Image (spheres, grey):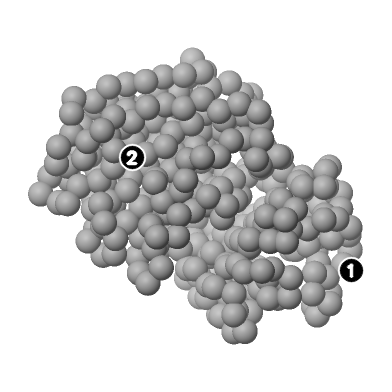
Amino acid sequence: MNAWVVEAGDVCWLRADVALAAAARREAGQLARGICLPAETVGRMELCVTEMATNLLKHAHDGSLALRVARGGGRVAVECLSLDNGPGIQDLAGAMRDGTSGTGTLGIGLGAIGRLADAFGVHSLPGRGTVVFARFWTDTPSLSPIPEPAAAVLAPPPAPAAGLGGVVSGGLTRPISGEQVCGDTWAIRAVGDEGRNGSLMMMCDGLGHGPLAARVADRAREAFRESRHTSPVAVLEDVHRHLRGTRGAAAAIALVDVARGRVELAGAGNITAAVVTDDTRVGLLSMPGIVGAHMPRPRMFETPWPPGAVLVLHSDGLSDRWKPADFPGLFGQDPAMIAGQLLNQMAVRRDDAGIAVAVHRGP
């Protein structure tokens, strides 16, 4: 098994209700202790998720918290995302100042959350919604102050996520309402020496919902992890063979080639793939078919991937009718926050939702 793997894990989703703060502290604490975070770090995290929860209850029309264990590059962390659908933060610079609490209760505010967390970000779309992101590593350097935000919709870019060479990556999944497990999954693994040559990325949507779809997704992730190929076509064929006898899936495999500045993609089924900058979006095609069942001979498509570009793969649990201009300032952020805001704004409520993001930070 390749040690340099970043992949989807279980996500604890908590909807905004009167018990949210207590539930968030409990679930975050359990995740933290499960990966042996120090007691001092657990305390910082519990304070942060409590502030996130009370902000949601006080100010948001509706929202939720997503908590997950993130692994990659030999490191482990707990990621906390607060997502809401409005009204947004009109004065983000003011909200980041010390002593400014979003609720008037804890009095710690977003700026203090930024100092308590090992990585932090906030992206707000006035009238549409806000994502607040905090990550707590098991092995972290000393904390540093968070500078003032550069614009009304954007906090400063957070520290990089789990990195694979010049690529940093992340993602998020959410099951359809009423299910506990998600049939969508994603994974990213290094190519070359610790990812210096780039990375391979998979997005998979197991057909249907619930445990059977999740089982397909797990098998696809296993096949992707164990494949020794670097060609997207060859890796997709490996996944196809591994999924035979199952209900099948839509899946796409992308190769991010840092040295050549290219992205290559092979896919079958309804997976959206796009290389994005602040003002451009270039799509890559996925062919009709079902991986594990009726998959045609794979074809490969490619496009440039310059420094600063973002590769987004998502299932049809998100509408593909989005463009970069709809999300000013988002695509310079941490991949987990990019994934969170796109899912927050574009998720289709009647389906599982899954999204994976890779960012080219450049030399």
Which residue is label 2 attached to?
A: 270
Left/right placement of residue 115 relative to residue 342 reads right
Which residue is label 1 attached to?
A: 99
- Percent across and percent down for residue 61 are 66, 69
Mark 2: amino acid: Asn
Q: What secondary structure is found at the residue carrying circle 1?
A: loop
Picture disc at residue 300: none
Q: Is residue 311 above or below residue 259?
A: below
Q: Quadrant of the C terminus?
A: top right
The residue carrying pointer 2 sits among few (fewer than 14), some (14 to 19) or many (20 or more) residues within 10 Å by Cα, namely: many
- Percent across and percent down for residue 279 are 65, 28
Q: Residue at x 54, y 64 (%)?
A: 66
Mark 1: amino acid: Gly
Left/right placement of residue 131 relative to residue 182 reads right
Q: Residue 239's quadrant in the figure?
A: top left
Q: Is residue 24 above or below residue 265?
A: below
Spatial CA distance of label 2 from label 1 is: 47 Å
Q: Residue at x 79, y 74 (%)?
A: 103
Q: Residue 223's quadrant in the figure?
A: top left
Q: Is residue 204 above or below residue 234?
A: below
Report if residue 132 is visible in the image: no
Q: What secondary structure is found at the residue carrying circle 2?
A: loop
Q: Residue 111's quadrant in the figure?
A: bottom right
- Percent across and percent down for residue 354 are 42, 51
Viewer-closest of 362 and 321: 321
Left/right placement of residue 235 relative to residue 74 reads left
Q: How many marks?
A: 2
Q: Quadrant of the N terminus?
A: top left
Q: Nearer the viewer, mark 2 or mark 1?
A: 2
